[in-house]
Amino acid sequence: MKFGDTIITQLLLAVGALARVLSMRGRMRLGVAIGWILAAMSPKRRLITLENVRRGLPDSSPAVHQQVVSSSYANLGIVLTELLAMPAISRDALVDQVSMPGFEKVVARHKQGLPTILLSATLS
């Protein structure tokens, strides 16, 4: 394993260990901080993200574009911390945190062999 890969692996293991002992709110805060770090570490990738947002939201202001990019990086960090914490999250805690109203319709369509497009979103 290359030295850089070893460093990244150790860093992810450490973040995972921390994420598993934090509360959900703590994981979110850690995730936002990681998102900021990721954005700062790759200015080139951030510019690509900004250009993609500009193309996707051409009628929005530059301030909105920046907000979408910042929120996207924060969300990336939050998702990372949540994934790393999964081994320590009980089924009951997960059920308490996830709401999927109407999912029974998806299950029913699946049982009938009907095609289905599933869209989802998060509310925070």
Image (cartoon, helix red, strand yellow):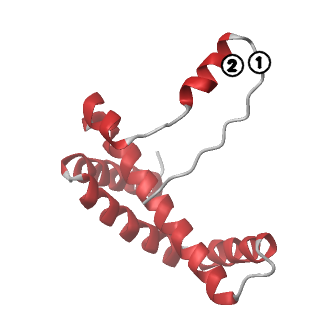
Per the rendering, the mark at residue 114 is 1
Q: Nearer the viewer, residue 61 or 31?
A: 61
Disc 2: CA contacts within 10 A as few (<14), some (14-19) or many (>=20): few
| SS assignment at label 2 | helix
- Marks 1,2: beta carbons within 8 A: yes
Q: Residue at x 73, y 28 (%)?
A: 116
Label placed on residue 91: none
**Residue 47 versus residue 17 in the image, above or below:** below
User: Which is nearer the eye, 118 or 3?
Assistant: 118
The residue shown at (72%, 72%) is 53
Q: According to the image, label 2 marks what residue?
A: 109
- The three-letter code of the residue at mark 2 reads Arg
Circle count: 2
Distance from Cα at disc 1 to Cα at disc 2: 5 Å
- Residue 40 placement (x, y as % from top left): 50, 78
Given residues 110 and 21, the one toward you in this image is 110
